[in-house]
Image: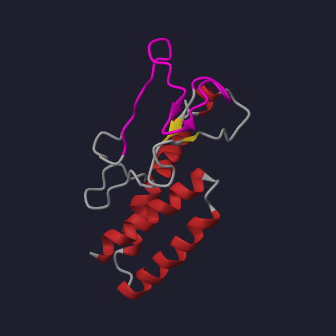
Amino acid sequence: MFSKHTEVVFGDVNLQENQVQKVHGESQSPGAGGWPTIRYFNKETGYGGKAYSKRTDKAMCEELGDNKAMLAYVETAAGISICRPETKLGCDENQLNYLEKMKDVPLEKRKQDREKLEKLMETYKDKPGRESRVRGRIEILKHLEL
């Protein structure tokens, strides 16, 4: 799913072999909040990373075992959209419909819509599913501005 996204890399640490407790002075808290311990690293979190915050009362493996939940989490943590408007790869039906709808909208209106969506992103910081949808629309509008 993310193989064509150079912005996304997955890693695995086996604590039996490597007792990683701190990274750049930041506690990694393995096992805290459930098992497996899920952390993400990006420009905002720096090298220490940040722990995944569960969104439901399900076990961690069940929560992120749901493909939509995992996709929303990775898109939010990485700050990307898996949808590639130029090829339509990774785009769901809603994104394809939005792409089709917006391609005939005047450039100035698309720019205004993108600015509104970027402001809306701030309100969805703790709602990965919604943030993911808005991010996908922003990426579509950016592509149409080219």
Q: Looking at the picture, does residue 30 appear above or below residue 97?
A: above
Q: Quarter of the image holding residue 93?
A: bottom left
Residue situated furthest top in the rendering: 16
Percent coordinates x, y for residue 69 in the rendering: 56, 41
Quadrant of image for the C terminus: bottom left
| Residue drawn at the location 56% of the way across and 65% of the way down | 121
Q: Looking at the picture, does residue 66 appear above or below residue 30?
A: below
Percent coordinates x, y for residue 130 in the rendering: 59, 57
Quadrant of image for the N terminus: top left
Q: Quarter of the image holding residue 53?
A: top right
Percent coordinates x, y for residue 62 in the rendering: 61, 27
Percent coordinates x, y for residue 137 in the rendering: 45, 65
Q: Looking at the picture, does residue 19 appear above or below residue 131?
A: above
Closest to the observer, 105 or 44: 44
Residue situated furthest front in the rendering: 25
The magenta region covers 8-36
Closest to the observer, 50 or 107: 50
Q: Looking at the picture, does residue 142 appear above or below residue 25?
A: below
Q: Quarter of the image holding residue 34?
A: top right
- In the rendered structure, the answer to whether residue 60 lies left or right of residue 91 reads right
**Residue 18 covered by magenta stretch:** yes
State how the image is colored: secondary structure
| Residue drawn at the location 63% of the way across and 53% of the way down | 127
| Residue drawn at the location 66% of the way across and 38% of the way down | 54
Dominant secondary structure (helix, strand or loop) of the stretch shown in magenta: loop
- In the rendered structure, the answer to whether residue 6 lies left or right of residue 25 reads left
- In the rendered structure, the answer to whether residue 126 lies left or right of residue 85 reads right
